[in-house]
Amino acid sequence: MNKKYTYVWVSLIVLVFGIIVVPRIVERLSSGSVVENDRLNASGKKIDAKLGYVLLDGERRKVPPFEFINQDSVLVSDKDYLGKVYVVDFFFTRCPSICPVMTTNLVDVQDHFKDANDFAVASFSITPDFDTPQVLRAYVEKYGINGANWNLMTGDHEGIYQLANSGFNIFAAEMPDVPGGFEHSGLFALVDKDGYLRSRIDDFGNAIVYYRGAILEEKGVNDHGEIEEIGILKVDIQKLLEE
């Protein structure tokens, strides 16, 4: 092809790119979406990833019935969460390791969805004998937790451990030799408005099941090379809110 015509075609392509594409990039930059999308893509998680159901023996796994008292000594059950998208975690107030990070991340998620009346958090203490409603209330005030949509629950010791290890399959156990005397995972479970456990689907078509909660979003990666998942948790909460 004549070089003259080649230059003409290149010029036309550049012009079209400038007219159509550049304004969209500028718009995304001004809204902050480029930063968010690029961060999520860099984490290896698809921004448009689908949400699936967590399955057990081929059946959709649902939150088992529970009933405990919260930081205000109010009885709270699984039925109180129906119609809400919520995040579940297991913690204890004297935890010297991952719990402060987990709670900080959940406060960040709480603030991110502060205008969503159908979003909530359910936290269960694995040291219920110590974590009385009064202790939980002090913890709420310490971390700036909004008690209107976030229940920190305590109650029957056996019931809470049954809920953690069998109900959610989120490990929790008494271990005197570890700091704090208790061992538990730093995972968050995501529940939809109908009470079903939901999660992002990975590249192989499998549910990731849980979200890492013990890595600060701003840190990105921990010392073991594990990538934070608070960013994708926020995205997936929004998807469930829109269902």
Image: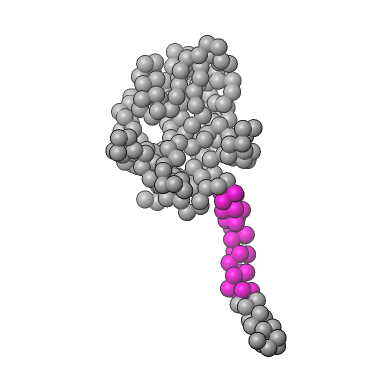
> What sort of colour scheme is used for the picture?
one colour
Q: Nearer the viewer, residue 35 or 224?
A: 224
Q: Position of residue 76 (x, y in %)?
A: 35, 27
Query: Residue 17 is drawn in which quadrant?
Result: bottom right
Region rendered in magenta: 17-42
Is residue 8 found left or right of 95 in the rendered image? right
Q: Which residue in the rendered view is the most extreme toward the top?
A: 176
Q: Name the residue nearer the viewer: 27 or 12.
A: 12
Residue at x 59% of width, y 23% of height: 97
In this rendering, the count of numbered labels is 0
Q: Main secondary structure of the magenta part?
A: helix
Q: Of all residues shown, which one is farthest toward the front?
A: 1
> Residue placed at 68% from the left, 88% from the top?
2
Vertical position of residue 13 compared to residue 161: above or below: below
**Residue 193, image x and y in percent?**
35, 42
Does the image show residue 8? no
Whether residue 18 is in magenta: the answer is yes
7 is within the stretch colored magenta: no
Residue 5 placement: quadrant: bottom right
Q: Residue 211: give x, y in percent of width and height.
A: 48, 37
- Left or right of 82, for residue 143: right
Tell me the residue at 55%/35% (across/down): 105
* Residue in the image at 58% along x and 36% along y: 226
Judge whether 225 appears above or below 74 on screen.
Answer: below
User: Can see residue 46?
Assistant: yes
Residue 121 versus residue 40 in the image, above or below: above
Horizontal and vertical percent position of residue 1: 65, 86
Q: Nearer the viewer, residue 242 or 203?
A: 203
Viewed as shown, does residue 223 lie left or right of 76?
A: right
